């Protein structure tokens, strides 16, 4: 259900990018596309793992799932960092960010719902794949809140001097957060592998 609900995100945000020149909007479209690939991978691993596999095969699938989420976060963060830095020096307000703002607000709500759901499931019985999904949705909720703030600023005060900083720095702050989360995934995986 989570990846099916996320599937329209890359398409809708691509349309929103065509309507706006916001750095945050461009970075958000890239992020949603990469994260959708990670969600589909996590779903596939979870379903495949239910088959008659040995413990070693299950562990290998779980590590692949964790690695795909870490790569998705790192790629998203790097893309957002580059776009935010570029737009900081060539900021051109304009365009309609309402579509992207709507997607970000809805995304924050849906992602927070999945974050809470995975948290409840983890309290009942720990599962490594669900733990990765819980952390992914926590990060996605945070990112959507930052995107909402930046796009709201662009929508309400596009020509104000502070908007340039909010739009550019908003995408960079989120980029650093995603990169930090990706490194955390890799460290936790390495610790468990020992």
Image (cartoon, rainbow, N blue to C red):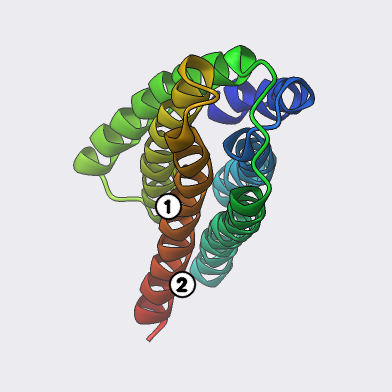
Residue situated in front as seen by the camera: 97 or 185:
97
| Quadrant showing the N terminus | top right
Residue lying at the far bottom in this picture: please name it: 194
At 46% from the left and 48% from the top, the residue drawn is 169
Residue situated in front as seen by the camera: 135 or 18:
18
Are the residues at dot 2 and dot 1 in contact (C-beta closer than 8 Å)?
no
Q: In which quarter of the image is residue 118?
A: top left
Q: Which of marks 2 and 1 is in front?
A: 1
Location of residue 86 in the rendering, given as x and y in whole percent from the top left corner:
67, 55
95 displayed left or right of 167: right
Name which of mark 2 and mark 1 comes first in the sequence.
Answer: 1
| Secondary element at tag 1 | helix
- State the mark number for residue 58: none
For label 1, count other residues whose C-alpha is less than 10 Å away and answer few (under 14), some (14-19) or many (20+): some
Location of residue 128 in the rendering, given as x and y in whole percent from the top left corner:
39, 56
| Secondary element at tag 2 | helix
Residue situated in front as seen by the camera: 150 or 179:
150
At 59% from the left and 50% from the top, the residue drawn is 88
49 displayed left or right of 148: right
Residue lying at the far left in this picture: please name it: 123
Is 36 placed above or below 99 here? below
| Residue receiving disc 2 | 186
Location of residue 15 in the rendering, given as x and y in whole percent from the top left corner:
77, 21
At 63% from the left and 53% from the top, the residue drawn is 89
Q: How far apart are marks 2 and 1 (CA)?
A: 20 Å
At 56% from the left and 51% from the top, the residue drawn is 49
Location of residue 72 in the rendering, given as x and y in whole percent from the top left corner:
61, 55
- State the mark number for residue 173: 1
| Quadrant showing the C terminus | bottom left
């Amino acid at each position: 259900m989570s990846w099916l609900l996320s599937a329209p995100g890359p398409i809708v945000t691509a349309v929103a990018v065509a309507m706006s020149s916001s750095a945050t909007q461009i970075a958000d479209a890239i992020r949603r596309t990469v994260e959708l690939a990670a969600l589909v991978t996590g779903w596939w691993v979870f379903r495949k793992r239910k088959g008659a596999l040995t413990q070693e095969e299950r562990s290998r699938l779980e590590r692949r799932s964790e690695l795909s989420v870490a790569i998705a976060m790192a790629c998203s963060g790097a893309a957002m960092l580059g776009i935010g830095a570029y737009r900081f020096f060539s900021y051109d307000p304009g365009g309609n960010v309402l579509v992207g703002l709507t997607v970000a607000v809805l995304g924050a709500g849906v992602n927070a719902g999945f974050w809470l759901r995975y948290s409840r499931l983890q309290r009942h019985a720990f599962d490594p794949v669900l733990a990765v999904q819980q952390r992914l949705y926590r990060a996605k909720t945070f990112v959507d809140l930052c995107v909402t703030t930046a796009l709201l600023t662009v929508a309400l005060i596009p020509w104000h001097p502070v908007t340039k900083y909010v739009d550019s720095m908003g995408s960079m702050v989120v980029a650093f957060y995603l990169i930090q989360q990706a490194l955390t995934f890799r460290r936790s995986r390495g610790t468990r592998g020992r």
